[in-house]
Structures are given as structure tokens and as C-alpha cells.
Image (tube, helix red, strand yellow):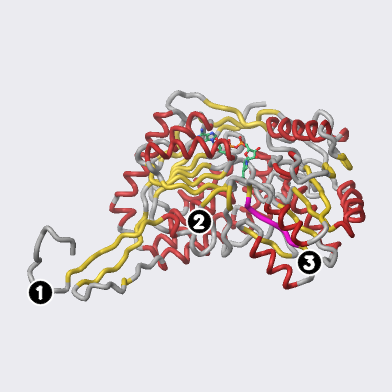
Amino acid sequence: MSLQTFRMYIDGAWCDAESGQTYDSLDPADGKPWAAFPDAGEADVDRAVTAADTAFHSSEWRSLTATARGKLLRKLGDLIAENTESLARLESKDNGKLIRETRGQVSYLPEFFYYTAGLADKIEGETLPLDKPDMMAYTIREPLGVVAAIIPWNSPLYLTAIKLAPALAAGNTIVLKPSEHASATLIELVRLAEQAGIPKGVINIVTGLGAGAGAALTRHPLVRKIAFTGGAETARHVVRSSADNFARLSLELGGKSPQIIFPDADLDSALNGVVAGIFAASGQSCVAGSRILVHASVYAEFVDRLVARATQIKIGHPGEDSSEMGPMATEQQLAVVERFVEKAKAAGAKLRLGGKRPASMHGQGWYYEPTIFECESIADELMQEEVFGPVAALIPFTDEDQALAMANDSQYGLAAGIWTRDIARAHRLARSVHSGIIWVNTYRAVSAMASIGGFKNSGYGRESGIDSVLEYTERKTVWINLSSEPMADPFVMR
Ligand code: TXE
């Protein structure tokens, strides 16, 4: 079967890599190649960044008012809304995520563009109450220049929307680099941006491998900001690259998020929250609730109920509406999960469910069963390391102090779920758990109005929400001398 071919978009033109090289994308549901993408090299990346820089300084882009930029983003949101089903199907094919999930994500995607479009003309400066009566000063928020957006494979459209919309709302230009494992939907997004009338060079996309196109992009001297979502090891390369160009950084790096279940919680609801947290998207979610801390008085009952519930999960082709868990997105990620599971077994963690590929999907791609372990210690690898797969690790706690200590005993700090009906306890823990998102009696809730981002090794910077546009601006201070006196002694600071 011939492969579907995609092209990159640089300076308003669709193109191949200068070298003519391509890479294949594999369908996680059968492991077979289905599409080919240009494998961009240094020269292609340089062309894309130069085009973005030229567009940034062009009168066409600079003379657009912030309100007009907002209108372009709204138009792009409308076009996404008109193409929800095809985008959702494509993303499901590309990264193996359930069509139920991609449809839900893409249906909400326009909201990020509408909300951020509204922020474009509300980027305001301040007048400073100076301690110098003869002077006044005010500030202006200016765009940074070329933004490099490095996107992973787990939720390409969503993770791009929360970078692209604020970058453009603030007046920057952008070069997108999708993951080599899931590049297709970002190309379609750029096609819609072209239709929306976004001027040439403002959005560019280079497809390619991380060590090639990704590294060339993040170290390019004209890049002024890098917005990165991905793994911690790759982030370290990106941070080192930014030592060359001093680009600003925002990093969202995943986590090992705790779900804390108290005995007074609605346990039916907590059960669903735990299933959503670790088995939705086959656990390939930055906010996966992968360590589950349960009060000792309900621990045994909760584990049994979780095992019973997870046994019912319907593993199936991601494109079928009835499937509840699809494959892992890549063969490498499946191997990562298998390695973690084997090590946990060898270390003596108690396997309660799964721990293998499902026999029902034999020979059909990269599926893995919902897997449940009981751990002895919060120091166990499964309690500390991000697996990024459908592997839940449970442990009992005896009181709130111990639950808090366990929750914070982590290198990560992205999200946490707290399940209790005790309102004071919920607020106490919301204050003291070190993570960027706290969900009380819910999990995996997302809104354009709410920021996401981590503490500790989960990264820094915030995306989405009212401040997201400010992350793509720099403050400038303007001083005005109000005095009619000539400027005095030039050798004294004023
Ligand atoms: O991601 P990478 P990988 C975590 C998860 C997973 C691990 C590794 O634990 O097991 O990361 O996943 C580009 N310079 N998350 O290896 O490498 C790459 O091409 C510049 C958490 O697939 O981080 C892709 O576009 N760019 C996460 C992007 O970085 C480089 C989502 C992410 O790939 C590069 C995914 C380089 N040297 C994985 N090397 C989350 N936070 O949701 C690679 N890239």
C-alpha cells in the first residue's frame, strides 16, 4: 500500500526537505507505516526561522492591530470547529489515541483560540508611580520575535494550541516542530491557518527528528523563545541549546501525579477519577494520576474495586467508538512500559492486574493491558518514576500528614487529585501539595481559562489561562523627562 505523503510549510509555501529525505510514521494500531514526512535538516530549519523572523519584522504583520490578530485567531478557531471530525480521525490514526478522546479534545480546541483571541487586545502596560517628580514612566508589553514550539506525540493539537494561540495573540511568529511519531495533524492545522489568512511566514512547520530538526531549531540564533512539552531528558538538551541563543523557555515535562483518597470521599466517584487518571489515553498523559494513595481503612476495598473495574475496560482499535483503551503510541513507549513492569515485578511489587500485552490484540500493534500494582514503599521505582503508560501503583496511608508527605515525596509536581468531602482538608491539601494543578473530587479537567504547568522537575512557565499571552511578551520601560530644566551633571545617575 502506498504511503500518504505530507509536506512542510515554510514562508507560505508547501515544500519537501532540501535533502529530499523523509521518515515514515507508523500506525500504532498495526505497527505498519502509513505516512511519510519530510525529514528537515539544518538548512530547512534555517529557512523556516529566517522566514519567521522576516515576517516578524514585516510591515504586514507589525501593522496588524492586536484586535485584527485576535480576529485571525477566531477565524482559525472556526475552521478547526468545521473540521473537528477529520482532525480527530487523523490524530487517532497518527498516535493511536481513542477517537472518543481525540474527538473530545478537538471539539474543545476552538475555545483555546477564541479565549486567547480575546486576550490579544488586552495586553496592557502600566504607568509607574515613580519616586522622581520630574519624570514619568510607563511600560509596554512587546512580542519577543520567533517562537520555536517543540511538540510531543501524545496530544499534538492541544499542546500546539496552547502555544500557538498566545504566541500569535501577542504578535510573535512561530516555527512548529511536531514529534516524528505524530506529525500529521499539525500539518493540517497549518493548512487551516493558511485558509484563515494568517500572513506568510507567521506560521511555519518543519517536520523532522528530534536530534536533527529539533536540535537545530532550539539552538538557532534568531529564536527568542522555546515552548517545549516532552520528556525531562530532552528538556535538558533544550535548556543547553538555549545557552547559545538565550531564548526564553517554558517547559512542561510530565509528572508522577498523586491521587489521594480519603475514607469520607465518594468512593464511586474516586474510582472513576482514578480510572480516568491512569487508564485514559493508555496512561500517556502528562497529568496521569499514576500513584494512588488510599487511606488504610478503605485501601483493600478500593484496590479490589479498582481491579474489578479495570478488568472491564474494553481494549480495542482506537478508531472504534466502543474502545476504551487503545495502543501505546510508539513501539519504544511500549518497551519502556514493559521494562518498568518487569523491574517492579522483580523488586517484589504485588501485581494485581495486567502486566502484559493483551492476548486479544495479538499481532495487532502496541497494546498493553491496564496494569495495577500494590507497592510497599513510597521509595519504590513505580512510586517515583514516570512510566507514561497504563500502570497504576497503589499504597496505603494512615493519616493526612502521611498522605501529604507521600504526595510531596517526588521529583515531580504537575498535578494532584484529592478525594474527600471534608472541605477544610481539601483546602489544606490544595495549599500544601507541591504541584501546579490540584483537582478536588475530579480529575483531568481542562479549560482555556485555567493555567497548566509544573513545579520541580515537571518544568516551569504556565500555558493556557489569562497569563499565557504575557509569557510571549517582554516588558519595555519608557521614561519621559517632564522637567523644563536642562539635564544637569552628566556624570551623576539621575
Ligand atoms: O519525548 P521527547 P519522547 C515523557 C514520557 C516519555 C518520555 C520520552 O515519560 O516516556 O518523555 O518521550 C523533540 N532537541 N513525555 O522521547 O524526546 C521530539 O522530536 C530539540 C512527557 O517521545 O521529549 C519531539 O518533537 N527537540 C510528555 C519532542 O522533542 C528534541 C509528552 C518531544 O520528544 C530533541 C511526551 C532535541 N535534542 C513524552 N530530541 C508530556 N509532558 O506530556 C527530541 N526532540
SS for callout 2: helix
Which residues make up the magenta segment?
Answer: 413-418
**Is residue 57 covered in magenta?**
no
* Whole-number angstrom distance, CA of label 2 to CA of label 1: 51 Å
* Whole-number angstrom distance, CA of label 1 to CA of label 3: 66 Å
Disc 3 residue type (three-letter): Thr
The residue at the point 51 percent across, 29 percent down is 211
- Residue bearing mark 2: 76
Residue 106 - label: none
SS for callout 3: loop
293 left or right of 136?
Answer: right
First in sequence: mark 1 or mark 3? 3
Residue 246 picture quarter: top left
**Is residue 417 covered in magenta?**
yes
| Residue 65, image x, y percentages | 35, 63
- Residue bearing mark 1: 484
Within-10-Å neighbours for mark 3: few <14, some 14–19, many 20+:
many
The quarter of the rendering in which ligand 1 is drawn is top right
Name the foreground residue: 66 vs 33. 66
| Residue 480, image x, y percentages | 20, 68
- Residue bearing mark 3: 420
